[in-house]
Amino acid sequence: MNAVSDITEAQFFDMVDRYIAQANEFSKQYPQPQIIASMLFAAARFNAHHWLARDRAQSQTVDEAAPLFAQEYEKMFRNNVDQLEASRAKN
């Protein structure tokens, strides 16, 4: 099994595509706002769990960590909007 740092870009985007496929499956059964909320909640729960399990030698507080997670999300969101808009403009 690969160490976490050994993941390839293809493996990363395979995981992303699988999360999106699951969300698309949910859209057959649930309203989109609840799918979005559940994905965000799941990401927050997963990240909180792993943040709490980190090496405690890292003295980062939750008040320091939360803005970093929010900034990372905003960066990814904006990047995806830009990519999707560019893709749509080509069509």
Image (cartoon, rainbow, N blue to C red):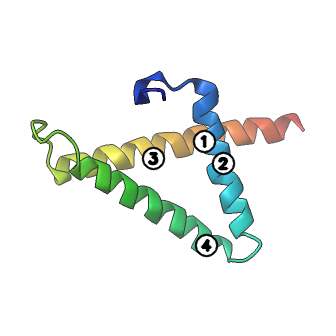
Instruction: Characterize the local packing of mark 2: few (<14), some (14-19) or many (20 or more) Cα atoms within 10 angstroms.
Output: few
Q: Which residue sits at x=66%, y=48%?
A: 18
Query: Of discs 4 and 1, which sits in the foreground?
Result: 1
- In the image, is 82 to the left or to the right of 63? right
Say the numbered circle drawn on residue 15.
1
Give whichever of 82, 31 is nearer the camera.
Answer: 31
Which label was assigned to residue 18? 2
In the structure shown, which secondary structural element does the residue marked by tag 4 occupy? helix
Q: Foreground mark, 4 or 2?
A: 2
Q: Nearer the viewer, mark 1 or mark 3?
A: 1
Query: Mark 1 and mark 3: span between their CA atoms?
Result: 17 Å
N-terminal-most mark, 4 or 3? 4
* Relative image position of residue 40 (x, y in whole percent): 48, 61
45 vs 76, left or right, is left
Q: Earlier in the sequence, mark 2 or mark 3?
A: 2
Q: Amino acid at mark 2?
A: Arg
Observer-nearest of 26 and 60: 26
Task: Give the residue at mark 4.
Answer: 33
* Location of mark 3 (residue): 73
